[in-house]
Amino acid sequence: MKNFFGRVFSTIVGNILTLSVFIFFIVVLVFVSILSTPSKSVNNNSVLELSFNNIVMESEMDQSVSLFDLSKQSKVYLLDIINSIENAKTDDNIKGISLKLDGISCGATQAEDLRNALEDFKKSGKFIYSYSNTGSQLSYYISSVADKIYQNPLGGTLLQGLSSNVMFYKNAGDKYGVDFQVIRHGQFKSAVEPFMRTSMSDANRLQLSELLNDLWGNMSASITKSRKINDQNFRLITDSLYAFIPELGKENKIYDVLAQENDYQKMLFKKLDLSNDKNKSDFEILEEHTINIDDYNQTLKPDTNKEKIAVLYASGTIVEGDGFDGIQSKTYVDAIREISSKDNIKALVLRINSPGGSANASEEILYELQELKKKMPIIVSFGDVAASGGYYIAQASDKIYAQPNTITGSIGVFGMIPNGKKLFNNLGFDFDEVSTNANSDQLKSLTTPLSNTAKNTIYKSIVLTYNKFVNHVSQNRKLTFEQVDKIGEGRVWSGKRAKEIGLVDDFGNLNNAIAAAAKMAKIEKYSTVSYPKRKDSFEEFLNKFQGGSVEASLQKELGTDGMKIYKEIKMINEQKGVQLRLPYDIQIN
């Protein structure tokens, strides 16, 4: 009897605790909802301020989910920002744009999209001014479109060009006893070079050099044109790091005015022709006439047209499975099938920003897109990266848009199985085994060297996958097998060169791709709908809460650089099967 009442008491207490936790979560959700309610409108004689303290996101797939983080996370995506700038161009209440981009975190093509939108805004005759404390190359690249650039006298920007630093693991493997067993197809498929060499191959050095020169050439050409600096002088400025010293930057036309932010605000007050008020300071009045991009986007009327164009955002590494961490094949297959089932969806725009990943997962996604193409047109828009598997899944397209700085191609395949037997032996571990067949121990153990049969089998699989990759590209791009093979072999190209050799059709941003999709679908009035659909934030949080956030804890312990090395090592273990993956991780800032 005592045990019975004990169990009843425990059940009641457990239910009360569960109900309390549930009520707490509901209260938090309501609180967050109240915080996110827009409270601003556009006053006359206002300035639109572009300042970013978070990563510029493209879809809700980029959003982190945490009920314990009550900071205001922007839900304004790249397309919203561009549309807001376009709307501000004809909004009589908006007199100009103020750029404060020190904290911006975005990719090179996102920066180009923003810069192009600002260039178009200038056609209205309205002003664009920029203020910077300590900026990055990308923030300056965007800001260089401004009529005047104001710089903090004790700040600066490190304009220095681009470089690539590749970490090699071979010596570490040799030292500690890990044999990276690598099989690849294509001389430029250099994703595996760090495990085979201690320095870059000539082929890899060539493609990296051409790629970086293309990217920097596009960026510097835009800067020099806007700032009216000749190429020779700009090279001297970057080589000598003049922009890092504000006085030298001003002397060399990188900055127009050296001033404190207080003086910049006074300038905006006069530019907006605002009147003094004895009950308010000039700064309070200016704040009332300054609207940020988040609030301004909330004032725009959403599209409610019945006919839709679906935008499928494919961002991250391609892997097998179901979830929202990267491009997980089942999640995307389900999303494509849902798009196919909607009669009001007339076209699809596939937005790709991926270095590739699993060959099998890429093939799964491509197959579903090919099935969808039988029903509706598919236009592809490339972001920063569309390489290897990221380029593979684009082969169901009617047209491909890229930017000159998009990292494109990498048509190649590799496989790698690390053998750590020597490492374990050095640590005092020994292994023995029995087997039923000649290769029973192959392709599944981290302590077994590859047999000749296993090596030949993997190589055949890689060649088969490569040929399939080339055939997909050949059919979709209307090129011969030989033409694709020549520009393939794992080589990466800038978007500029990719257009020249036929890997993409035209330059353009996501809006251009959506417009092309509408034209192909023969619809004039439409709205867009984003896929894949994330789960309800409460449900998704509970899933994460139950599983724990191991990587978040590691990030806190290891820091940014340590976490990067951890992810590199983790990736080795996750590379199951044949891989269609970009040779390296490229970040431009």
Image: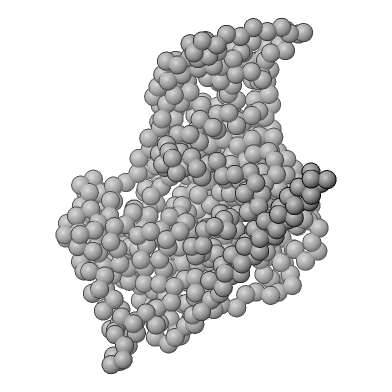
Asked if 503 appears above or below 102 in the picture, the reply is: above
Would you identify the image quadrant in which residue 467 lies?
top right
* Residue 390 as seen in the image, left or right of residue 143: right
Q: In this rendering, does residue 517 appear at all?
A: no
Q: Identify the residue at horizontal 58%, vertical 23% (top origin).
A: 416
**Residue 189 or 59: which is nearer the viewer?**
59
Asked if 512 appears above or below 295 in the picture, the reply is: above
Could you tell me residue 29's position as x and y percent? 61, 65
Could you tell me residue 506's position as x and y percent? 55, 54
User: In the rendered image, which quarter contains the N terminus?
Assistant: top right
Q: Identify the residue at horizontal 59%, vertical 21% (top origin).
A: 417
Residue found farthest to the bottom: 278
Q: Identify the residue at horizontal 35%, vertical 44% (top origin).
A: 162
Q: Identify the residue at horizontal 39%, vertical 82% (top origin).
A: 288
**Residue 75 or 10: which is nearer the viewer?**
10
* Residue 68 as seen in the image, left or right of residue 538: left
Would you identify the image quadrant in which residue 75 lies?
bottom right
- The number of callouts visible is 0
Could you tell me residue 134's position as x and y percent? 29, 57
